[in-house]
Image: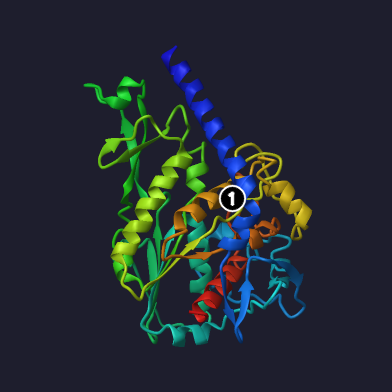
């Protein structure tokens, strides 16, 4: 009976918290998009909001920036051309056109020259690896002298020897340290509430995979979000996220979105203390999923062959609809609030990516479940890197 009551209370707490978030974001949605989206100088003093635009057919495109069969960093399941996805090459025949400026493909050779003697670190989940692989493969297309290594506990990294430019990826799902938790026989605060197992999440301790990254890299690109809205990974009843701060459990237990707020506050503060004054710090906004007909483990699929229309985007992602893919805009709400008074730059890829329901691997590579979360490579994460370079050029 106690477990059942606890399950009911947890469910009600999550629902109420989500409803409050939905109402708040609905009221602020328009002003947030206008004020938070990065606008940088492009050309001769023209301010550009890169998130306001459209995907347009590009008759000059269609040739991949890099060879997916020779760039071994690309997962088999992400390599949509080699895996035979029917629209694998068609994905490349679209380009993102901001309403008030242009976003051309970046020149990899110029990039290598400009960022000679620079360390660039991607810190985050597998979607940041998606972006990391895109950048590495693009640079490898023009520079073959590459050393593979793992600087400061990176999951993987490459140094382009002629330019002493290092690009590394630090894998971390939540940014903060977490691990399995089990009730102690002698009891404790959580045990007294009926908890028997779950995941301990220390909101004030960075994951060891990137703890030294801020002191090593000159340019950092962070992300988090997908794992915070993942009941299949952190079941709210069977294996809940149990948040700790200064070594003690936070009571009453917090729902995941409030835990995310605390983690972001601590991690942003940590990075700002550990980076040098010349370091450039980005936080990438949430990458949208495009599951239709259910979530990934409920038969959801991404069958579309062309970018979505604006009204289709709202149908899939509107907070009012509260559909399968709603977490993209919910996560951004938390990111924008946490980053508001920080020295981070926001790399806003969400809206441009919401249109591209056609650009996921789906079943390419023989997946058991359709992959409507990661992106085909080559693909639109190439455009994310165009956006990154455009912002770097403006600084």
Q: Is residue 316 above or below residue 123?
A: above
Q: Nearer the viewer, residue 281 or 212?
A: 281
- Is the residue 6 above or below the residue 1 in the image? below
| Residue that mark 1 sits on | 328
Q: Residues within 10 Å of mark 1 (few under 14, many from 20)?
A: many
Measuring from the top left, give residue 119's x and y in whole percent: 37, 75
Q: Is residue 303 visible?
A: no
The picture places residue 250, in percent across and down from the top left corner, at 33, 35
Is residue 272 toward the left or the right of residue 339 in the image? Answer: left
For the N terminus, which image quadrant?
Answer: top left
Residue located 33% across and 73% down the image: 277
Q: Is residue 4 visible?
A: yes
Q: Residue at x 31, y 72 (%)?
A: 276
* Image spot of residue 108 (x, y percent): 53, 82
Q: Is residue 111 above or below residue 174?
A: below
The answer to whether 52 appears left or right of 131 in the picture is right
Task: Please give left or right for residue 200 compared with residue 128 in the image.
Answer: left
* Rendered image quadrant of residue 149: bottom left
Disc 1 element: helix
Q: Quadrant of residue 67?
A: bottom right
């Amino acid at each position: 009976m106690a477990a059942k009551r606890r399950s009911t209370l947890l469910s009600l707490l999550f629902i109420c918290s989500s409803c409050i978030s939905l109402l708040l974001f609905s009221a602020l949605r328009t002003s947030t998009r206008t004020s938070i989206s990065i606008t940088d100088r492009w050309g001769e003093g023209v301010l550009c909001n890169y998130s306001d635009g459209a995907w347009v057919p590009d008759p000059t495109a269609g040739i991949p920036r890099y060879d997916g069969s020779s760039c071994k960093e690309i997962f088999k399941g992400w390599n949509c051309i080699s895996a035979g996805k029917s629209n694998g090459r068609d994905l490349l025949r679209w380009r993102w056109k901001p309403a008030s400026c242009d976003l051309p493909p970046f020149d990899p050779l110029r990039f290598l020259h400009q960022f000679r003697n620079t360390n660039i670190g991607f810190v985050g989940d597998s979607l940041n690896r998606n972006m990391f692989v895109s950048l590495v493969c693009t640079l490898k297309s023009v520079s073959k002298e590459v050393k593979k290594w793992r600087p400061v506990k990176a999951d993987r990294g490459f140094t382009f020897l002629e330019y002493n430019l290092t690009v590394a990826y630090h894998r971390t799902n939540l940014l903060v340290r977490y691990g399995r938790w089990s009730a102690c026989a002698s009891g404790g605060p959580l045990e007294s509430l009926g908890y028997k197992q779950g995941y301990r999440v220390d909101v004030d301790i960075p994951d060891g995979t990137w703890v030294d990254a801020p002191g090593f890299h000159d340019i950092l690109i962070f992300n988090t979000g997908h794992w915070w809205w993942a009941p299949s990974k952190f079941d709210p009843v069977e294996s809940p996220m149990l948040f700790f701060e200064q070594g003690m459990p936070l009571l009453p237990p917090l729902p995941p979105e409030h835990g995310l707020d605390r983690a972001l506050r601590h991690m942003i503060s940590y990075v700002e203390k550990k980076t040098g004054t010349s370091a450039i710090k980005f936080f990438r906004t949430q990458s949208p999923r495009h599951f239709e007909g259910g979530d990934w483990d409920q038969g959801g699929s991404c069958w579309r062959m062309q970018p979505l229309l604006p009204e289709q985007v709202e149908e899939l992602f509107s907070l009012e609809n509260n559909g399968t893919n709603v977490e993209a805009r919910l996560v951004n709400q938390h990111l924008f609030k946490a980053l508001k008074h920080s020295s981070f730059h926001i790399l806003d890829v969400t809206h441009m990516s919401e249109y591209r329901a056609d650009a996921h691997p789906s079943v390419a590579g023989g997946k058991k479940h359709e992959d409507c979360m990661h992106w085909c490579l080559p693909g639109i994460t190439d455009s994310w890197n165009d956006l990154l370079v455009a912002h770097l050029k403006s600084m």
